[in-house]
Image (spheres, rainbow, N blue to C red):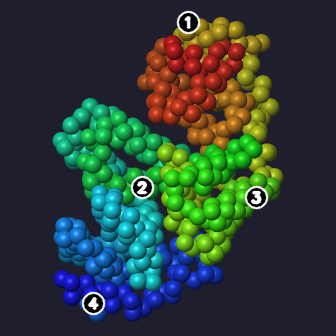
Amino acid sequence: MQKFALVCLLALAISTVYCGSSSSSGSSEGKRNKKQKDCSEDLVEETGPSGECMLIESLYNCSSQLTDPADILIFNQFIFELNFTLFSSNNYTSFDIVSIASFKIKKFFLKYSHFQVKFKYFQIGSWGCFADLFQVGIQIADDKCDSVLEVNESGNFSIIISLQKYRHLFPNKAAFDLFIEYLLQLLSNTEIDINIRMTDIYVLIQKFTVDYPECKSILMEIEIEGFYSFEAFFEISCQYYRATQVTVLLNGSPLSFLYNSLLACVKDTTIVISTSGRQALKAFLDRMTFVIQMEGLSIQQKMKLIMKEYHIFCKTYGFLKQILLNFQISAEFGCFEDFINMFLFCESQNCWPEEYLILPSTVAPSTTESITTTEAITTTEAVTTTEVITTTVVPTTTYEPYSGGCSHAASNVLTVDASGFSVIYTSSTTQMTGWTISEKNVWKNFCVKFTVEVINDNTAFPTAALKITEIISRINAYVVYYATRKTKVYSIKIGIWGSIEQLCGC
């Protein structure tokens, strides 16, 4: 085995620079990442003198640096199992193998943290390091994620079918069933922007695995038909979630949350950094802040400039790169490396939130809701106060101020104007200050949906009481996992009757 490891070490030392070197100093982080992804097939298709592919040879090279016999045994056993699992099947493409291997190696490193510390940034020939592999693996998996988000030929979601097959493994089946129910709702709501849908899915999975930790390992191991593991799907959703948090990180007064978090790490005396190193890191943060405070740029443009500053910093202070990458931004978001990876994911997959692409000069008009004359007038219209609700509009002077009285909810809340908009919809459009464009669109689509499916459906919901109950149920399900969303939605005033919070209390 030692002889074989030595051969692998030599092979890596003389390995060809496949697809061109990824370490070219002239490349941006995004271009470097794209090149690595495009060339990732070489990791499993190109072989060295040992006859093993680049990826397996690099793992044996890691093993050759271990001295503890127990560690060597564990590491080599993992390599053997990985090699057998990935290359014994003809069902995988080279890209599949790279992605699956990335998740398995990452999980192995996390299980044995000393391997993670020692080998996370270990070079795989001239392609890149294992940290690069982990990120490219997520991007490759996302290329196949449509198969998870779309229904199959039978009209079902493959992820739901795959999860239900393993229901018997979960100790808390009631919690698992509820999780499946909510996941199905999110998957089915195709009207929602993909960024919001994947973010909501991440929050749902995160909450379930935190509330029921005994279910996490079972859930993550499940293989999704036509895709990879559930863990791969979770990692993809995490990238979408982090992307939605960028506005939070770049905001702050007088300095951004991102700056303050990283500066705290620079000042942390428990982290071993020389005085000159701290000064260099502080200078990088100052340049980053200059970019954040620049006017006239979209968030995506600012992110690209931050990456450019990061690239320049790493060229000059390469010895500080790993220290910077490990700086914690927050327990919820992760570290600076997660920030970098989120940028690379959004660039590679072209999945930036829509509002991140808009220049500030065009944000003001687009975030101010354009209410038509009809909509403005119809906020003072109400249906007749009968139990049978129809879409016939009878003009009145104004809503009666019942202050959220449940006995009068039906005659006020179920109002639909001549254009087909519910009073909740028209009231909401004037109360969305501080909402993102995606949040506005999702909520308005939600309002339109329950207007059509509940308020206008006198067959499924023949009485006002049934309509009110159903709307309350849907709103509660809409906000159940999201504190910020709940605060925003509950604060909406429905005409002058009362608030959505009061409605949900009926």
Image quarter hosting the N terminus? bottom left
Q: Residue 235, labelled with which disc?
A: 2
Q: Residues within 10 Å of mark 3 (few under 14, many from 20)?
A: few
Q: Distance between the residues labelled 4 and 3?
A: 49 Å
**Mark 3 vs 1, N-terminal side:** 3
The residue located at (46%, 52%) in the rendering is 238
Residue 150 seen in this snapshot: no
Which is closer to the viewer, label 1 or label 2?
2
Q: Helix, strand or loop at disc 1?
A: helix
Which is closer to the viewer, label 4 or label 2?
4
Which residue is at the front of the view, 463 or 309?
309
Say which residue label 4 marks. Answer: 7
Left or right position of 322 against 492: left
Q: Helix, strand or loop at disc 2?
A: helix
**Mark 1 vs 4, N-terminal side:** 4
**Mark 2 vs 3, N-terminal side:** 2
Q: Distance between the residues labelled 1 and 2?
A: 47 Å
Left or right position of 413 against 333: right
Dividing the picture into quadrants, the one containing residue 127 is: bottom left
Q: Helix, strand or loop at disc 4?
A: helix
